[in-house]
Image (cartoon, coloured by chain):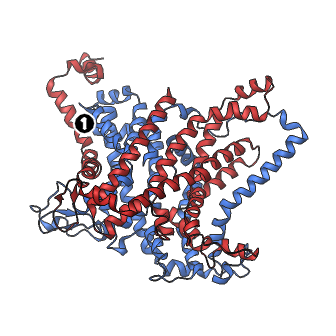
Amino acid sequence: MLSKIKLFLRGSKETNRSEFDSATRGLISPMEMRSTKARLSYWVVFIVLLLITFTCVFPVYWMYTGGLKTPVGMLKFPPELFPAQPLWDNYLRSWNDLNFPLYFGNTVALAAGSWVLQILISTSAAYALSKLKPFLGNVILFLFLSTLMVPAMAYLIPQYLTIVNVPLINLSGIPRWLYDWLPGGLAFHVLPDGRVTLLDSWWGVWLPQAASAFNIFVMKSFFDEIPQDLVDAARVDGASTFQVLSKIILPLSTPVMAVITIFTVIGSWKDFFWPYLVLMGREDLTPIMVALFRLTNVQSFPQPINIVMAGLAIASTPPIIIFLIFQKQIIRGIVLTGLKG
Amino acid sequence: MAPNNKSSAQLHKPGGQLFLHWWQIFQRNLIAYLFLLPALLVFSLFAWYPIVRGLISSFQRINLIDPPVWVGFENFRLLFIDPNFAVAWRNAGYYTLLGLLIGYFIPIILAILVNEMRHGKSYFRLAFYLPVILPPMAALILWKMGLYNSDWGLLNMGLKSLGLERILWLDSKQWAMFSLVVFSTWANAGGTLLLYLAALQGVPAHLYDAAEIDGANLVQRLLHITLPQIREVMLIMFVLQIIGTMQVFTEPFVMTGGGPANATLSIIMLIYRQAFSYGNYGVASASGFLLFVVLVIFSGFYLWLTRKFSK
């Protein structure tokens, strides 16, 4: 959480220099590169770097191919680059044995819910702060941003206590049929005295994530760039406040929405600790990473190592694919915000 | 154009506020606050309230069964007499130090080298970033079960085939912390490397050209141009790494469970135990509050650094 602050501190300076592969030169000039000695050392460094990338790439490759081997074949040394008889069935077995469809579904639901809430909350708040400029707007913005200063891990316990017993809210006067029908993870528990607990409910994961000052800040800085004249012109033409948002601001904001969407989806996919805590009592609602964590408990989930590897490979594939598709946007986002995936 | 239209345009200009009727001002603010309402609600309940609650519950006895009782500094007293408290903070210090020793310079060196490459730059970037793309949980299990396992992990199989003694990567006191730091470096260096690469791209070419004309050799250029130019990012990364490692949790939680013999017990792991194993949420809050104070000092330093540099 804390690294996110970097965005609003580094400001626009980094924006101008974020483009990779610009036609700048490095330490070594093109002239110097012409000498044989320079060329030779260049290629030596090149090969050394190539070998170092091997330590990053190989474990991942080994994980994917490990899912095709027998348990014994997996742990051979030197490792087989590719098994002579690939056991494609392992992936299918892993998919079924580790109950992937359920956990994938849960992860998608958690990501979708977080996305909807985050977009709704951050666009409306950013619109109000950027274009409607209410009384005390700057104070509110400051209060939003100040939450970025507090490291999330340090208020883990009070955050948890809040979920256990949501303050201010009491549903004792509200008829049960209004919320009783909510299925699965959408359901939440109401204590006999009307207090609400979000433990074992997806709301307990969604709502704290929705309080994202980072998103509001990114959105607001983007909205600030949209000329006020455009908004005024629409108002003159009789557009309501909501129409200005939906017809003018939002259509112009697709790039920033895309960035927030990508980061929300990847973030939800990788999320482990908070869903683990909140959904402790409802294994059937947990996302994929919590399910993977249970694999490490060998006593209760004895699985052969090759099946585990296949499972890890399956769970790692969506973020890798998302990254490969949106590489440009993600890298720009990381460089701009210092937020690492 | 009708004069009527013109005046309504004036009304909505920010500068035109003076001419607005008080009712319109009220209405405008009302609408703005309606748009802010969802955010205000969510922040009040799930961000501002917990932050304040963190301070309050540090002074309460909370077990989720009885109502909270005010106990003054009792939680802090209990905390300080718990031998694990010192162990956790010492481990955090050790982890941070080891992390800086092993992990701090690697991305800097790699970024400088990658930036000089004329071939395969995008491959290098992608390859170094691959561990960061991997979900941390998958990477942790891959290393724990596949590489670090003492009996049949790939690393020990390699040592065995070389005729060397096996190493208890995660199961021995002297190696466990080191293994965690190596994993963290592997898993995170790529992200930092990208930031350094961006900073290196921003070093103006004319500086190098000028230095060359003055006869500066490669090492001189590195020391007097490259490093000073990325110094601010280096300092920021330094502080951020400290803030990050103080909050480490998932790595020891998944890989070692804090063991062996508490050798990798981190501060957050201790908080987790105090709350969820012993049901002592007050002591856990007090623990979190202390961590919060220390981290805020670092963040303040970080803010000061970034402010200083952005001038």
Residue A339: where, in percent of width, then height? 49, 47
Above or below: residue B86 compared with residue B197: below
Q: Name the residue under label 1.
A: B32
The residue type indicated by label 1 comes to Ala
Which chain appears red?
A: B
Residue A127: where, in percent of width, then height? 33, 38
Q: Quadrant of residue A273?
A: bottom left
Visual hue assigned to chain A: blue
* Left or right of B296 on screen, residue A162: left
The number of numbered badges drawn on the structure is: 1
Nearer to us in this view, B156 or A49 = B156
Residue at 40% from the left image edge and 63% from the top image edge: B84
* Left or right of A229 on screen, residue A51: right
Residue A65: where, in percent of width, then height? 66, 73
Nearer to us in this view, A90 or B193 = B193
Nearer to us in this view, A318 or B88 = B88
